[in-house]
Image (cartoon, rainbow, N blue to C red):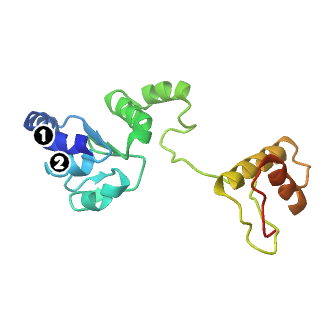
Amino acid sequence: MPGATNFKDCAVLESVVKKQAADGRLYAAVCASPAVALGSWGLLKGLKATCYPSFMEQLSSCATAVESIVQQDGKVVTSRGPGTTMEFSVALVEQLYDKEKADEVSGPLLLRPNHGDEYKVIELNPMEWKCNNIPQVRFQCWLVVYILLSLCTIADPSSSLDEDTEIKVCLINFSDPCTNC
């Protein structure tokens, strides 16, 4: 966060970015900077933008806040945070060149199959506990068991796992037994 505040307080940067905007040229920010710097400089008025989740409320006071990985509106590109910088970079390539160049750059990076799609989380092998009571298992134990069971099911889709199998895996692999099952 100190970076966004330092950007906001840098008169030279403010002057350069405002000139970019006034000349209709590309300008961009990521993480807290869309809300803290671009917003405070008045460069997001009437535009859609995104930023780090804990700054969305501040962003909504100076832009139309959108919860997306990368948001492009006119010549401004904004993104959510450090984990979205690859997508952010590809969006900048698209703005500076074209979609074809962005696809060429993003393909080898394995960012996503269709440029512009949001990430999707799909649970392929949902785990259903079949116990009389809620299992009292440490999170790490449950997570590893879940991963092991998912991998077993993926490796052999015809296999059927019952509650006894699940508990045995937990007991075999961990000193902390599943209790109350």
Of 73 and 134, the residue lying toward us: 134
**Left or right of 103, for residue 164:** right
SS for dot 1: helix
Which residue has dot 2 on it?
43
**Left or right of 27, for residue 170:** right
Q: Quadrant of residue 53?
A: bottom left
Name the residue located 88 percent from the left edge and 56 percent from the top edge: 165
Q: Quadrant of residue 6?
A: top left
Name the residue located 8 percent from the left edge and 38 percent from the top edge: 11
Amino acid bearing label 1: Lys
Spatial distance from mark 1 to mark 2, Cα to Cα? Answer: 7 Å
Where is residue 1 shown, x and y percent of the image?
Answer: 27, 46
How many numbered discs sit on the rendered protein?
2
Where is residue 65 shown, x and y percent of the image?
Answer: 31, 58
- Is there a contact, CB below 8 Å, between mark 1 and mark 2? yes
Where is residue 75 shown, x and y percent of the image?
Answer: 26, 40
Q: Classify 10 Å Cα crowding around label 2: few (below 14), some (14-19), many (20 and above).
A: many
Where is residue 152 shown, x and y percent of the image?
Answer: 83, 45
**Left or right of 95, for residue 10:** left
Of 34 and 114, the residue lying toward us: 34
| Mark 1 or mark 2: whose residue is earlier in sequence | 1
Name the residue located 49 percent from the left edge and 24 percent from the top edge: 104
Q: Quadrant of residue 136?
A: bottom right
Mark carried by residue 68: none
Q: Classify 10 Å Cα crowding around label 1: few (below 14), some (14-19), many (20 and above).
A: some
Which residue has dot 1 on it?
18
> From the image, which quarter does the C terminus lie in?
bottom right
Q: Residue furthest front?
A: 175
Amino acid bearing label 2: Leu
Q: Is residue 33 above or below residue 101?
A: below
SS for dot 2: loop
